[in-house]
Image (spheres, helix red, strand yellow):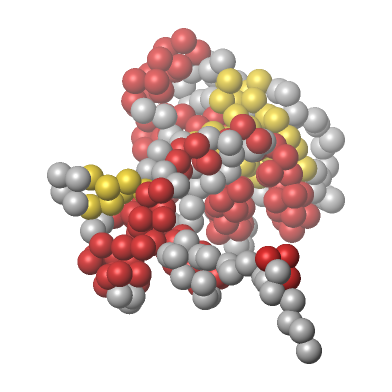
Amino acid sequence: MVVDRSPAAVPEAVTDLDGSSRGGVQSVDRAITVLEILARTGGAGVSEIAEEMGVHKSTASRLLSALDARDMAQQDHERGKYQLGFGILRLASSIPGRLNVGAEARPFLRALAEKFQETVNLAVLRSNFAVNVDQAMGPSTLATSDWVGSLTPVHATSSGKMLLACLDTAERGRILKETGLPALTASTVTSRPALEKQLIAAAADGYATSYSELEIGLNAVAVPVRDHRGIAIAAVSISGPAFRFDPKKAPGLLAELKETGQLISEKMGHPRR
């Protein structure tokens, strides 16, 4: 039998990132692990990476060399340690442009509204107002108010308070100076110290509430949505009539709302802590 040994008949060897021709999936996994180590530590040497991964120094060195060649890692020649390369930025920069918080949040808003049978809103901060950009109505919602596109005052809504709580002191002060704290109901917080106390608590607790402060008989609670930089870009709130809806007393509501905020944040590139 004649064996065809022409170039077309011989399969090309698959070469991995570490230069070997075995375990392609393993090598990709190892390369990603190296990047995760560099991201977490801010910089590490060959020996450190090899020890953490449980591989030989030569393997770690080959992985780093391959990543360096692709600009995914770079060596600080003074310290001898590697850090993430600018190639990571090139890849990452293409992601935020295609992320739409409204589109990413929609299925989570619907699921939350269905579970607690109340209205769920997604709001962002625009021109000193909390602007509702999406809404999901619960099956038992009494009112049919469409809040999408509505400009709501930041000091009287749970979403507005949550977004304020995530701002630095200077920016928060600027907004409140321009908007003031007008009374919308008898329950609206109109004292700056009192509001600041609520915002400090919201930042610490991870949620903000509003009890009949925007409308008499309407209660709400909100949590933040963060992007890949950790910046609060939106707030998810759930609201309902005061006679049946108390955010702090509804079983499991706060935990579920926080989880929803976390899941949407993950979609926007913010890792779970």
Q: Is residue 248 above or below residue 3?
A: above
Percent coordinates x, y for residue 191 in the rendering: 41, 23
Percent coordinates x, y for residue 34 in the rendering: 38, 60
66 displayed left or right of 244:
left
112 displayed left or right of 43:
right
x 41%, y 48%: residue: 69
Percent coordinates x, y for residue 167 in the rendering: 41, 29
Please identify the residue farthest to the left as the structure is shown.
78
Asked where in the image residue 195 lies, by quadrant, the reply is top left
The quadrant of the image that shows the C terminus is bottom left
Foreground residue among 220 and 7? 7
x 30%, y 75%: residue: 56
Foreground residue among 96 and 129? 96
Percent coordinates x, y for residue 92 in the rendering: 52, 40
58 displayed left or right of 234:
left
x 53%, y 35%: residue: 93
Please identify the residue farthest to the bottom as the structure is shown.
1
Foreground residue among 56 and 123? 56
x 74%, y 58%: residue: 115
Q: Is residue 154 above or below residue 257?
A: above
